Amino acid sequence: MPDGQTFRVTGRPHPDGAFALLFEDISAEISLTRRFRSEIETSQAVIDTLEDAIAVFSNGGNLVLANDAYCELWDTDLAGALGRYDLPIELRKWQARCTPTRIWTNLREFTSHMGLRQAWSDTAILDDGRHINCFALPIKGGMTMIRFHFGKPNGPGLLKHGEKSEPFVMTKG
C-alpha cells in the first residue's frame, strides 16, 4: 500500500460460486524481515571493508561467515558455492598453502573444545614466504572467529597455543 502497509490476501471458494476473502495486515512482520535483512547486509559490508581475512565457524565446524579478504586469500567462493564449506575443508586449504607447522592441529583442537576457551594466536609461513598471523577467538554461541593478519600483530599480542591471554579492555584516551 502507498502508506507502507502490507496485506496478505487469501481467497477461498464457497458454495454457489462465492468467495471468502481474508485480509491480513502483515506490515509488522515484513518490516521486521526487511530490517533484519538490512542489518545482515550492513554487517557483511562492514567486515568486507576490513583488511584482515576473517572467517567464523559454528560450533559444529561449518563456515557461517567470511569476508572478501578471506575469500581472496584462501580462494573461497561463497557467492557461487555449490557445496558447503567447513573447518576440515578450510584447514586442508590452509595447510596446503603453508609450510608445515603445528598451528593447524592446535586450531582444530581449539575449535572442537567444548567449554571455556582462551583466545590464542600463532604465526604461519605461506608458501610464498610471507608470514601470516592467525588469531583464534571464541565468540558467542560456541562459535570461533579466525583472523589472518599480515605484518605485525594488531590487537592482542601473539600467544602460542596453551598460553593464557589477559582480558582485552578498551579505554578512552
Image (tube, helix red, strand yellow):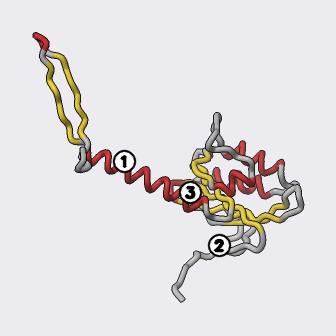
**Location of mark 3 (residue):** 115
Q: Which mark is residue 146?
A: none
**Nearest the camera: 167 or 151?**
151
**Left or right, residue 115 beside residue 13:** right
Q: CA distance from mark 3 to mark 2?
A: 16 Å
Residue designated by label 1: 33
Residue wearing tag 2: 165
What residue is rendered at 55% in x and 79% in y?
169
Q: Are marks 1 and 3 in contact (CB under 8 Å)?
A: no
| Residue at image coords 12%, 16% | 18
Between discs 1 and 2, the one toward the N terminus: 1
Answer above or below: position of 159 versus 28. below
SS assignment at label 3: loop
- In the image, residue 167 above or below residue 77: below
**Which corner quadrant holds the C terminus?**
bottom right
Q: Nearer the viewer, mark 3 or mark 2?
A: 2
